[in-house]
Image (cartoon, rainbow, N blue to C red):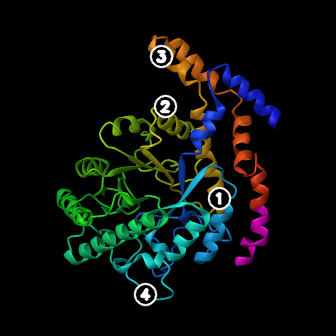
Amino acid sequence: MSKAYDLAKAVYQTHGVDTEAAFKRLDKIAVSLHCWQGDDVAGFENNISLDGGLAVTGNYPGRARTPDELRADIDKAMSLIPGTKRLNLHAIYAETNGKKVGRDKLEPKHFARWVDWAKANKVGLDFNPSFFSHPKMDNGLTLSSSDAGIRAFWVDHGIACRKIAESFGKTLHNTCITNFWVPDGFKDTPFDRLAPRKRLADSLDKIFAVKIDPRYDRDAVECKLFGIGAESCTVGSHEFYMGYAMKNKLLLCLDSGHFHPTEVISDKLSSTLLFVDEVLLHVSRGVRWDSDHVVTLTDELRAIGEEVIRHNFDKRVHIGLDYFDASINRIAAWTIGARNMYKSLLLALVEPAKELASVEKKGDFTGRLALLEEAKTLPFAAVWDEYCERCGVPVGSAWLDEVRCYEKNVLAKRG
């Protein structure tokens, strides 16, 4: 393998690419793994079925049933994934020691064991309020409900989550990114779209009016085209959140499954980052709709990596994964998606950027197309394998053997 890398390194050098510099830069880019892949977005409240436009398909054996099982599974997945990693939590993963605690009453102490785990693993934590799967959803509405009491409950939940996130950042000395996704919408065509959007904006204003130290927590807002049961109107549309993020100096979250199938978030990055300071990405793979398939090395994933790297957005773009597949081994799903995310970034880091920029500046579009195509068959596999080796994770498909062993010795015993 060492010889293969040395040969690949030499090939890239002929194109002006320093693979060693690419490794160093990639080490500084964190990808936030999503805890909900391990238990099908069940969380630990166990009081209501999944709703809010969310659906998980499949019943592969071995789903994590407890916080300890989930953490053990995340540990296993992280041992198979190279690079700098973070963990993204939802509020429904609180640990309340068997006591009933309302989401509006959640506190940092309910996530103490997650913080201990993060300290031990030297990873940062990100966070999300959970505006779904709860009795206080008013016909699919939370922050935009016409019921003032319902809105107040969810406003308190949002405030509580920001305080929890601030405690994460302060304790771990690592800024937490808190993402607000609100699934509110209508199954059939509403007469009045304006009133619920005004209520949503007012509720968000109340949540963000509470002062939180930006050194410890940064807030993002996430748009969506539609959801199951909210096909005709999503209150928090792209235009709504683009405007809200710009007006209030928040991060805009772009989810790769939350737009029309002909839209791609890679094309939105250069435009969005002209007007907002930072962007949060939720990377998934939609198949015809927001179906949250495991991330594969598609043209769009490569394009996301290219946009981040080509324009030096890696300090302004925060990358998180967001999919949940229960039809295959869940640890394999984590591993496949995360490794592909890192591959897309490394591919962008070793493309012949100087050559491409030079021919484009000259107006040589023939040369640009030729170089872009030739770059696709440069010896990237040897560079990727070397990076995995240096990170101490399995090379090639060797990780799959470890997953199968874990499945036999751990997952299969869960019943």
The percent coordinates of residue 95 (x first, y second) are: 50, 80
Residue found at x 37% / y 69%: 161
Per the model, the C-alpha gap separating discs 2 and 4 is 49 Å
Q: Amino acid at mark 1?
A: Met
Q: Which mark is residue 96?
A: none
Q: Which residues are magenta?
A: 404-415
Along the polypeptide, which appears first: circle 1 or circle 2? 1
Q: Nearer the viewer, residue 377 or 156?
A: 156
Whether 405 is among the magenta residues is yes
Q: Which mark is residue 310?
A: 2
The percent coordinates of residue 325 (x first, y second) are: 59, 60
Q: Amino acid at mark 4?
A: Lys
Q: How many marks?
A: 4
Per the model, the C-alpha gap separating discs 3 and 4 is 61 Å
Along the polypeptide, which appears first: circle 3 or circle 4? 4
The percent coordinates of residue 305 (x first, y second) are: 53, 38
Residue indicated by mark 3: 360
Residue depth check, mark 4 versus mark 1: number of the one nearer the observer = 1
Image quadrant containing the C terminus: bottom right
Residue indicated by mark 4: 100
Name the element at disc 4.
loop
The percent coordinates of residue 204 (x first, y second) are: 25, 62
Residue depth check, mark 2 versus mark 3: number of the one nearer the observer = 2
Along the polypeptide, which appears first: circle 4 or circle 1? 1
Any part of residue 129 in sight: no
